[in-house]
Image (tube, rainbow, N blue to C red):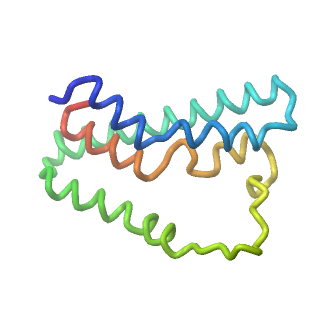
Amino acid sequence: MASLLYVFLILLVAIGPARAAPLFAARTAAAPAGERRRAAIAAVAFAAAVFGVVVCIGLMMRRIWSVPWPILSIASGLFMLPTALRLMSTVQAPGDPQPDGRGRLGRWSEAALGDPIIVTPCGIVVVLLFSADGNL
């Protein structure tokens, strides 16, 4: 069983709150303080719910369905493959305009919840693997 510090550091790197905080601040800069607070609480609650479901799935895969660890690792890698390919194939020319950081509907809470800022594919895979291994 991994130490608590090890699990915390891996989750910190995989989920990346340092990447999410500036994006969230930029998207909610024009919002009143109460609206920003509600959007932040909603985003954290959404992320916690998603990670809770992922933990349950990881535990179920290992305990009920007896999915072997190597197969779960390969499936997790295949889950991350489309994201990695999309990130590598996205090229922005120097003259292209920067995205404005708004979600489809332009609302702050929807932008925070709709984009994989807090719940990243890497974070999902790490939580799934830790929970399936019994280290979380």
Placement of 54 over or under 114, stated as above or below: above
Q: Position of residue 42 (x, y in %)?
A: 65, 32
User: Is the C terminus in the top left, top right, bottom left or bottom right quadrant?
Assistant: top left
Viewer-proximal residue among 69 and 10: 10
Q: Position of residue 78 (x, y in %)?
A: 32, 65
Placement of 121 over or under 35, stated as above or below: below
Identify the residue shown where x is 17% and y is 48%: 65
- Of all residues, the one furthest to the front in this rendering is 94
Placement of 71 over or under 112, stated as above or below: below
Residue 119 appears left or right of 1? right
State the count of labels.
0
Q: Quadrant of residue 35?
A: top right
Identify the residue shown where x is 33% and y is 44%: 126
Identify the residue shown where x is 77% and y is 30%: 36
Q: Position of residue 62 (x, y in %)?
A: 18, 43
Viewer-proximal residue among 83 and 89: 89
Placement of 14 over or under 76, stated as above or below: above
Viewer-proximal residue among 97 and 94: 94
Q: Quadrant of residue 59?
A: top left
Identify the residue shown where x is 35% and y is 29%: 8
Q: Quadrant of residue 129?
A: top left
